[in-house]
């Protein structure tokens, strides 16, 4: 039952950081994991999941690759699951060893910077949106929920199994941007309308906390602040929606 104990422990951020592992839960997320380059340590499942076609196929595929497969009772599985109504399959996998310095900015760069985004669902959608709009990478600053939180992984639907999503301190981010000639812009309702902005070839776009917006520390380093047009009857955009529209408007 080693992997059951590990899966339970990985519900904690400190355990994920210490072990360099995470849990992918649910049929679709595990499907994406199986087809990704990441290493899989174990697959845990219930008898009910093994009898279902998609989950059963995943269990068979994992076993064929030599991945340990552990059948559990519903009660045992629930003790490791993060969802209220689990689908009966999860995998323990290895986080990619990727740092900010390993990201090649290329000729054209679009980074999405997450400044203390706290909702795991938002972070997962932000990662998926950045990848869909062909951004170079997502960079999560301190105060942002762990990128390998189980809900983040599910919300991203496996996107960051293949897409660069890294954590970095603000000083490290600023040093990287300066070293590679990447401009830093922020987003805020009081900024310059995004449709009037002329984006540089290399650009990092920062989105702020759901309630507080951009931090004072980050805002002070932004070369420009841009905003989206919005009805006066609506208070604000969801941060993931705002990021998607902004990245699309500022695409190269």
Image: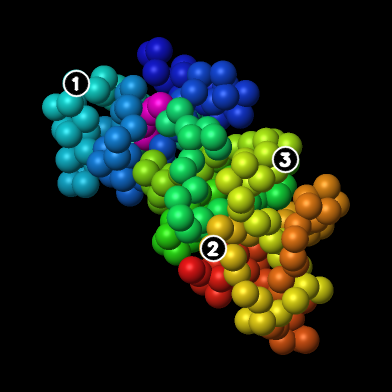
Q: Earlier in the sequence, mark 3 or mark 1?
A: 1
Q: Earlier in the sequence, mark 1 or mark 2?
A: 1
Which residue was labeled with disc 3?
170
Which residue was labeled with disc 1?
66
Q: How far apart are marks 2 and 3 (CA)?
A: 22 Å
Give the foreground label among 3 and 1: 3
**Whether residue 8 can be seen here:** no
Residue 38 place in picture, x, y as percent: 34, 32
Q: Please, which colouring scheme is shown?
A: rainbow
Front residue of 5/176: it is 176
Give the foreground label among 1 and 2: 2
Residue 89 place in picture, x, y as percent: 34, 37
Q: Do the residues labelled 2 and 3 touch (CB within 8 Å)?
A: no
Question: Going 55% across and 67% down the picture, which residue do you hit?
Answer: 247
Give left or right: position of 208 versus 160: right
- Checking the image for residue 201, the label placed there is 2
* Secondary-structure class at tag 2: loop
Residue 95 picture quarter: top left
* Secondary-structure class at tag 1: loop
Residue 147 place in picture, x, y as percent: 55, 40
Q: Earlier in the sequence, mark 2 or mark 3?
A: 3
Q: In the rendered image, which quarter contains the N terminus? A: top left
**Whether residue 107 can be seen here:** yes
Question: Going 19% across and 21% down the picture, which residue do you hit?
Answer: 66
Q: How far apart are marks 1 and 2 (CA)?
A: 45 Å
User: Which region shows up in magenta?
Assistant: 90-95
Residue 112 picture quarter: bottom right
- Checking the image for residue 142, the label placed there is none
Looking at the image, is 227 positioned above or below residue 46? below
């Amino acid at each position: 039952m080693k992997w059951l104990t590990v899966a339970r422990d990985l519900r904690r951020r400190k355990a994920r950081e210490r072990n360099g592992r995470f849990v992918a839960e649910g049929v679709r997320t595990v499907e994406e994991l199986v087809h990704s380059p990441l290493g899989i340590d174990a697959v845990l499942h219930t008898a009910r999941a093994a009898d279902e076609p998609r989950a059963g196929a995943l269990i068979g595929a994992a076993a064929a690759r030599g991945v340990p497969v552990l059948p559990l009772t519903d009660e045992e599985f629930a003790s490791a699951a993060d969802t209220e109504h689990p689908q009966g399959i999860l995998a323990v996998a290895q986080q990619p060893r990727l740092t900010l310095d390993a990201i090649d900015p290329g000729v054209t760069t679009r980074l999405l910077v997450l400044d203390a985004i706290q909702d795991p669902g938002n972070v997962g959608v932000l990662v998926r949106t950045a990848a869909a709009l062909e951004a170079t990478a997502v960079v999560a600053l301190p105060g942002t929920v762990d990128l390998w939180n189980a809900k983040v992984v599910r919300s991203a639907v496996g996107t960051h199994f293949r897409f660069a999503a890294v954590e970095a301190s603000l000083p490290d981010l600023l040093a990287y941007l300066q070293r590679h000639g990447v401009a830093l812009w922020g987003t805020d309702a009081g900024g310059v309308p995004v449709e009037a902005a002329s984006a540089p070839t290399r650009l990092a776009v920062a989105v702020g906390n759901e309630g507080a917006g951009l931090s004072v520390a980050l805002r002070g380093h932004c070369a420009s602040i841009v905003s989206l047009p919005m009805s006066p009857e609506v208070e604000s955009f969801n941060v993931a929606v705002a990021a998607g529209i902004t990245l699309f408007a500022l695409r190269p």
